[in-house]
Amino acid sequence: MSKHTFTHLDALESESIHIMREVAAECKNPALLFSGGKDSIVMLRLAEKAFRPAKFPFPLVHIDTEHNFPEVIATRDKLAADLGERLIVRSLEDSIRRGTIVIKNPDLPRNPFQSVTLLETIAEFGFDACMGGARRDEEKARAKERIFSFRDEFGQWDPKNQRPELWDIYNTRVHSGENIRVFPISNWTEMDIWQYIGREQLHIPSIYYAHEREVIRRNGMLVPISDLVKPKPGEKVEVATVRFRTVGDVTCTAPVESNARTVDEIIAETASTRITERGATRMDDQTSDASMELRKKEGYF
Amino acid sequence: MSTTTQLLRFITAGSVDDGKSTLIGRLLHDSKSIFEDQYSAISKTSEKRGMTAVDLSLLTDGLQAEREQGITIDVAYRYFATPKRKFIIGDTPGHEQYTRNMVTAASTANLVVILIDARRGVLVQTRRHTYLASLVGVPHVVLAVNKMDMADYSQARFDEIVAEYKAFAAQLNLHDVTCIPLSALVGDMVVDRGDKLNWYQGPTLMEKLESVEIDHDVNTTDFRFPVQWVCRPQTEEYHDFRGFMGRIEAGEVSVGDEITVLPSGRSSKVKEIVTLDGNLQTAFAPQSITITLNDEIDISRGDMFAKADYLPTVAKEFAAMLCWLSETPLDKNRKYLVKHTTRTAKCLFSSIDYRVDVNTLEQHANPAVNMNDIVRVAMKVQQPLAFDHYKRNRASGSFIVIDEASNNTVAAGMIV
């Protein structure tokens, strides 16, 4: 590598590695949140870059809604096993059994409840820092969040009380009981993620690539048919060629129509798309202009 | 955008009245970085507020808390890309917390766009923004003379403003200053040239952002490598492996180079430069790498590798310019923590020499130190730090001050 080829991806990668190493060095008991989605797969590669030839100095943690795409869970398990890293899975079902989550309608999205299980998992293992793959370009509440984001004992984010972040000097200090969410890929965009997946030849779940799927059209979005989502009376099921730009709760993640079957084709499509990633794919973000901000204040990533 | 584009971080300084949000909106809009759902959301809001045209400034509106209270919080980061570069904008609001916010955003910026209204010319706040840019050492300055449409697109007016501004900037040792006449509202000289400013031959704002030379924004000569993490895999395969992980903050290093470990002063030779993608012969700032050495010497997090041809200063006392960030004033009788590169140590302020009035640049002796104040101080630290003057090396000349009781970051420091 010469000085003349230090690209934006190199700059972002080096910044993310630096952040992960700061977390490992300064936090007592960190964890890396890993779902098997594309952003967390990029995080896993960055952790390899940061810590190999040693093992990661933290476990991988997945907060499972059990509203999953099977391809994503398969990828999650395979990647963790291939890397030989420890994967901790805690499920919303655990919280439901404990009675800390009460689900009135089993078909509704479970994203809002993830915060409960996450906070219980943080308490169970005593994690003082959780690294997540959120990006600032995803959503305007995230655009204003720090890379090291402090949460009080209730896991709450207070947007008006954030520590200033200067240079690359991060203040990681917390009082006992508090914890930090750390976002090493804050400065990456959807395009950067795809370019990096291409450059690093990362294995991602097949549903990110164009495939045929049964869907219904609801409020301008394509809703995938699954065990949890059935057509309502009058709705017509059709087979469309689609891919997922994000993967989350299967009941509230919509695919987009696409013929992009390779990373290069996805990059070309991402360059010309006119709709934001979450705007196109997340039904739960559409409920109000401040949905994400409210969830973050409750302890969400 | 290809995978070989560079990353440029810039900030905009100016008040709402100068059209700062409109300028950012214009850059995003004309570079086709606004998505349809974002555009339709701000169209709806513009309509609700009774505006006739889409208010591009709404794009930088963020949180519910802000919309309800009509305020802007701290710094928001925005992203866009052109075929030539990827950009990160640090967007800071223009109210009374401005000094703190601007210093924060400027600390990572390659370039600052200082916005002024062509009708009002160089104001007190223009001088303040320019002083802060020079204090934080932002390498490139663009003076955007906005609202040229309201000033008859007058070349004479532009020339007059430029002459006054350049005289001021010269006093502050700002070397790379580019002045551009533009209209963010109409779109002249932002991305497109428009047809009203034909007397101006220089680059549009976008051309400047796409072409400014940033390879030398980091110090490329004085090797500085703060050790972040010591890697000891203790597996069979890597039984004796002892790697020093960190990011090269300045300069470069090659296999076989003799390095000095500070503060101990011991030296060794670089055996390998390890990365996941294979070993390197040479690595340079700002790469994150792992270094192994020929000799077993005692090294831990917080130590710094440098080369003997230009070593940093190792000392327990130094002078610094400080931007106080906290609502709680500085207490001279208390001890604080300083975090400098990867080393954190207890510190105290042995003297507070003067406060700089950011509007007039006058110095006031024996000041109290409140939020947004810029002061010169003398500091003592419990353990020696390996540092450089901030002007020579941003990475090894900067530090933050942490209040041990609240854990808050209370000041940003630049060693002088």
Image (spheres, grey):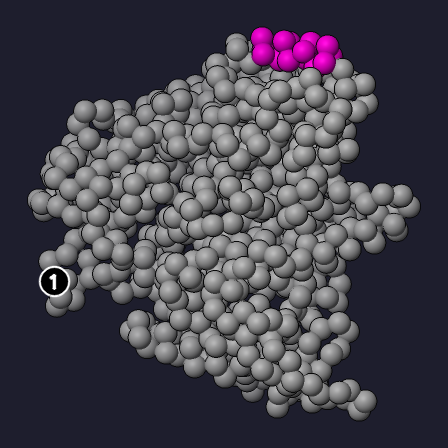
Can you tell which quarter of the image residue B382 is in? top left
Foreground pick, A114 / A153:
A114
Which residue appears farthest toward the left when viewing the image?
A: B295
Which residue is located at x 64 percent, y 80 percent?
A240
Asked if the magenta segment contains residue A296, the reply would be no
Judging from the image, what secondary structure is the residue with disc 1 in?
A: loop
User: For the C terminus of chain B, which image quadrant?
Assistant: top left
Which residue is located at x 72 percent, y 58 percent?
B37
Rendered location of residue A129, percent (x, y): 44, 59
Foreground pick, B112 / B407:
B112
Subunit that carries the residue with mark 1? B
Foreground pick, A76 / A54:
A76
Rendered location of residue B67, percent (x, y): 77, 48
Which residue is located at x 54 percent, y 19 percent?
B177
Rendered location of residue B387, percent (x, y): 31, 28
Count of numbered circles on the image: 1
Which residue is located at x 64 percent, y 9 percent?
B164
Q: For the magenta stretch, what is the residue range? A: B155-168
Foreground pick, A160 / B32:
B32
Can you tell which quarter of the image residue B112 is in? top right
Of the residues shown, which amino acid type is indicated by label 1? His
Q: Is residue B202 above or below residue B218?
A: above
Left or right of B221 on screen, residue B175: right
Q: Is residue A4 above or below residue B368?
A: below
Residue density around tag 1, few if under 14, some if 14–19, many if 20 or more, within 10 Å:
few
